[in-house]
Amino acid sequence: MPQMAPLLWLNLMFMFLFTFGLFIILNYYIYTPLKTEFNKEGIIIEQKHWKW
């Protein structure tokens, strides 16, 4: 059974790290967040009447 030379394992590791990093970077920049809808009236503040 043939064995791989250490340099081939090193090349394989670098190729894996490069593709993994590229995958992570592309997923980060391709993500587009959904636009959130906001209330046109603004923020509704409820007044609470405290009894001390």
Image (cartoon, grey):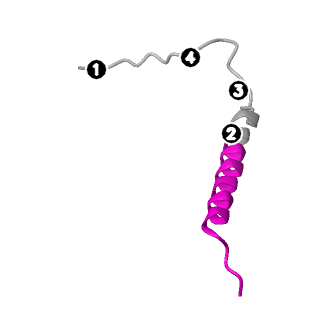
Q: What residue type is labelled 1?
A: Lys
- Sequence-first tag of 1 and 4: 4
Is 7 magenta? The answer is yes
How far from the left and from the top, in percent, is residue 26?
73, 39
- Sequence-first tag of 3 and 1: 3
Residue 34, placed above or below residue 8: above
- Secondary structure under tag 3 reads loop
| Dots 2, 3 in contact, CB < 8 A | no
- Sequence-first tag of 2 and 4: 2
Q: How crowded is mark 3: few (under 14 residues within 10 Å), some or many (20 or more)?
A: few
Q: What residue type is labelled 3?
A: Thr
Q: Which amino acid does label 2 sit on?
A: Ile
Residue 12, placed above or below residue 17: below
The residue labelled by disc 2 is: 25
- Residue visible at 23% across and 20% down in the picture: 52
Q: Which residue lies furthest to the bottom in this view?
A: 1
How far from the left and from the top, in percent, is residue 5?
64, 70
Q: Which residue lies furthest to the top in this view?
A: 41
The residue labelled by disc 4 is: 44
- Residue visible at 44% across and 16% down in the picture: 47
- What is the distance, in whole Å, between disc 1 and disc 2 at their CAs? 55 Å
| Dots 3, 1 in contact, CB < 8 A | no
- What is the distance, in whole Å, between disc 3 and disc 1 at their CAs? 37 Å
The residue labelled by disc 3 is: 36
How far from the left and from the top, in percent, is residue 42?
62, 12
